[in-house]
Image (cartoon, rainbow, N blue to C red):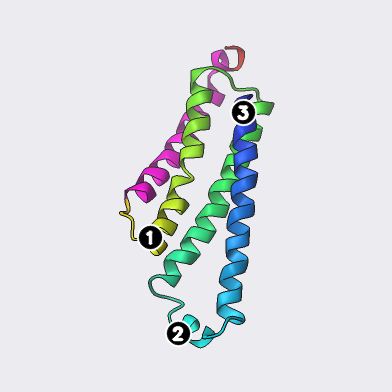
């Protein structure tokens, strides 16, 4: 699969998942039985973290779509492009890790790893776009 195309595909799928999760959060807040209890805990754990997962999931999905598009259109090739692509995909560990913490009680390391991965992806992609030798590689 072309570098960048996978980011777009996975980004769109992740966006659909986190949008659907957002609809679930709206249902729990506005329509579900016991919504008053849910609203009372809206600003604290686990509801706050659930909203963080929804927001960061959509943001990181959008970043994957954008980064993938940029990699295809600039075009950015070579090892830096592969690193930027995989690091951006790794960024999705952050919202997945938040959901793991909320629903499964998993440790927070995937959240930190995903955040660092997305940051590193942006840095690597910036370097790759600035280097003329990467466009031809």
> How many numbered marks appear?
3
Q: Quadrant of residue 26?
A: bottom right
User: Residue under circle 3?
Assistant: 71
Residues at marks 1 and 2 touching, judged by CB atoms closer than 8 Å: no
- Tell which of 111 and 21 is nearer to you: 21
Residues at marks 2 and 3 touching, judged by CB atoms closer than 8 Å: no
Decide which of tag 1 and tag 3 comes sooner along the chain.
3
Residue 104 numbered tag? 1
User: Residue under circle 2?
Assistant: 40
- The spot of residue 113 in percent (x, y) is 36, 43
Q: CA distance from mark 2 to mark 3?
A: 44 Å
Q: What span is in magenta?
A: 109-134
Residues at marks 1 and 3 touching, judged by CB atoms closer than 8 Å: no
Say left or right for 33 vs 95: right
Q: CA distance from mark 1 to mark 3?
A: 35 Å
The answer to whether residue 79 is above or below residue 106 is above
- The spot of residue 108 in percent (x, y) is 32, 53
């Amino acid at each position: 699969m072309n570098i960048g195309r996978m980011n777009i595909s996975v980004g769109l799928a992740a966006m659909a998942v986190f949008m659907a999760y957002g609809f679930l959060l709206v249902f729990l807040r506005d329509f579900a039985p016991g919504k008053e209890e849910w609203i009372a805990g809206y600003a604290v754990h686990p509801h706050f973290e659930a909203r963080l997962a929804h927001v960061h999931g959509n943001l990181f999905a959008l970043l994957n779509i954008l980064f993938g598009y940029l990699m295809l259109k600039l075009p950015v090739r070579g090892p830096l492009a592969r690193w930027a692509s995989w690091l951006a995909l790794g960024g999705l560990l952050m919202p997945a890790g938040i959901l793991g913490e909320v629903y499964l009680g998993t440790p927070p390391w995937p959240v930190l790893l995903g955040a660092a991965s997305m940051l590193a992806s942006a840095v690597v992609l910036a370097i790759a776009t600035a280097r003329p030798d990467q466009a031809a590689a």
